[in-house]
Image: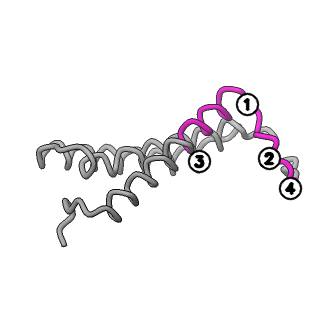
Amino acid sequence: MSPSDTGPPLVAGRLVIVVVSLFALVLGVHVALSRRFPRAWLRFGRPTTSQRPQPVRIGGGAALVGASLLIQPAPFLIPTPFVLGAALFAVAMLLAATAAGWFILRRD
């Protein structure tokens, strides 16, 4: 099996990853811009007083992780040259590192 195999289970798995990452990206941008957590998140447990002012931090981190996960399966779903696929992978890793730095260093 090579990474470019197009078997139905592999394509379905990659499409699931794209849908989940797109959802994380949209939800993260929504939380960061509206500065409010979704009500479903608050039903499971109230944020502590130190977590209440951090929707931009958490939403921005979720958006960056979603963008990173969205870029990674692109070379497998869309025919691309090797160099472009490697560049997309490098961008995805850079976004993941930025997400970690954003979440760790950002203080609201």
Q: For this rendering, which residue is in front, 26 or 87?
A: 26
Measure the C-alpha gap from mark 2 to mark 4: 9 Å
Residue at left 50%, top 41%? 22
For residue 72: magenta?
no
Residue at left 56%, top 43%? 23
Numbered tag placed on residue 35 in the rendering: 1
Numbered tag placed on residue 84 in the rendering: none
Mark 4 or mark 3: name the one nearer the start of the chain: 4
In the picture shown, does residue 31 fall above or below 1?
above
The residues colored magenta run 24-45
Measure the C-alpha gap from mark 2 to mark 3: 22 Å
Residue at left 71%, top 27%? 34
Numbered tag placed on residue 103 in the rendering: 3
Q: Which residue is mark 2?
A: 40
Mark 3 or mark 1: name the one nearer the start of the chain: 1
Contact flag, marks 4 and 3 (Cβ < 8 Å): no
Amino acid type indicated by mark 2: Ala
Amino acid type indicated by mark 1: Arg
Measure the C-alpha gap from mark 3 to mark 1: 15 Å
Q: For this rendering, which residue is in front, 82 or 13?
A: 13
Amino acid type indicated by mark 4: Gly
| Residue 57 rendering spot, x and y as whole percentages | 65, 40
Q: Which residue is mark 4?
A: 45
Mark 2 or mark 4: name the one nearer the start of the chain: 2
With 26 as the anchor, is 74 left or right in this view? left
Mark 4 or mark 1: name the one nearer the start of the chain: 1
Q: Nearer the viewer, mark 3 or mark 1?
A: 1
With 104 as the anchor, is 50 left or right in this view? right
Amino acid type indicated by mark 3: Phe
